[in-house]
Amino acid sequence: AQDRYASIREKPAETMCGTVIRLDMNAGLMADLPSLEGSGAEGVGLFRTELQFLIRNSVPRRSELAALYRRVLDAAKGKRVVFRTLDIGSDKVLPYMKPQDEPNPALGWRAIRVGLDKPGVMRMQLQALIRAANGGPLSIMFPFVATYSEYQAARAQMDKAMAGEEKLGHLLPSTLEIGAMLETPSLAFAPNQFFDDVQFLSIGGNDLKQFFFAADRENERVRRRYDFLDSGFLTFLERIVDRSAASNTSLSFCGEDAGRPVNALCLAAIGLRVLSMRPSSIGPVKHMLRKHNLSEVKAVIDQARDRGDQSVRQAVTDYLLTK
Ligand code: PEP
Ligand code: MG
């Protein structure tokens, strides 16, 4: 399937109206890295570090992690890699972590909440990342941040790790970008200071959609009940786009929907300029973006919303059929 798109692999994801969308890929294992060249992705917009923890039966050592992250950076050959710190709990249970008996794991003690309450593993991970960068650029994002204060606390851990590594004589990253995933609705309503302070944001649409509609992404009975192109959800996403733009904060979208061509086109139409997806989606999404004009798609979305359509999907699909 990848070959169908070979002719556009080296071309930009430039729409008919001349807007260039950056397409990154999601990864989590060393085995994913060769796709960086094959898919035409510009970088790794989301590196899920928990996969390395999930495939073992004991906590990895800091030196092992540093070596692994170094291999990831080497394989990326200078392309940007955004490492997401450990996102465990909920659906991702570590074999060596005491299982938590929680009535609602998706709303429970997970991701950055664990990292802030039991900072040992996160500190080790941050140190390993600094060592892996070895004086080069480093991008890190924290998962599941629900409030500005959680971001500040996570950021403080990073500052502490930097100071500690410097004292030990390790090289510090040449540039350091610290971002947050926006995957809880509360963060979309954080104070302006948060949007000004955070260096970049990435919308985790899988979780954000689950919480917006209160529909468990793991539950087959409800997970497809609400459309990603629901008018209200798009309006919500647009608000995040506007708030990020007002603060000049770079924003990407890294949930599965970024890799679905029609959804990706609508994301671009409401203002997203960076999409991160599984490598096999880069070709189909690029193909879709290159054929369309964002202002036309935006007008179709706006008309559908004004008419009161529950979802804009029908209107957008009809429009695409006329093209
Ligand atoms: C998301 O929630 O959209 C996301 C990218 O993270 P994950 O799927 O790993 O929860
Ligand atoms: Mg998530």
Image (cartoon, rainbow, N blue to C red):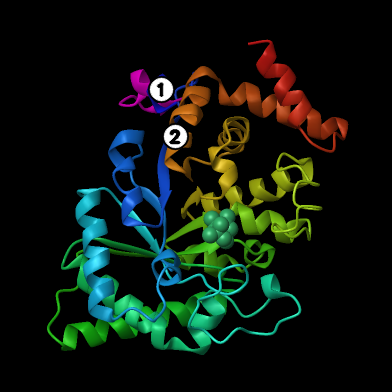
Q: Which residues are magenta?
A: 5-14
Could you tell me residue 188's position as x and y percent? 64, 61
- Relative height, residue 135 to residue 288 (above, below): below
In the image: residue 192, left or right of residue 283: right
Could you tell me residue 130's position as x and y percent? 25, 73
| Residue 173 appears in the rendering | no
Identify the residue at image location x=41%, y=38%: 22
Look at the image and tell me in which quarter the N terminus lies.
top left
Q: Which circle marks residue 5 in the picture? A: 1
Is residue 245 inside the magenta stretch?
no
Is residue 9 inside the magenta stretch?
yes
For label 1, the SS is: helix
- The residue that mark 2 highlights is 282
Could you tell me residue 187's position as x and y percent? 62, 66
In the image: residue 142, left or right of residue 11: right
Identify the residue at image location x=21%, y=69%: 67
- Relative height, residue 262 to residue 149 (above, below): above
In-front residue for pair 221/195 = 221
The type of residue carrying mark 2 is: Ile
Residue that protrudes farthest toward the left in the picture: 169
Identify the residue at image location x=62%, y=68%: 190
Quick one: label 1, few (<14), some, or many (20+) residues within 10 Å?
Answer: some
Quick one: label 2, few (<14), some, or many (20+) residues within 10 Å?
Answer: many
Q: Are marks 2 and 1 in contact (CB under 8 Å)?
A: yes
For label 2, the SS is: helix
Look at the image and tell me in which quarter the C terminus lies.
top right
In-front residue for pair 192/123 = 123
Q: Which circle marks residue 310 in the picture? A: none
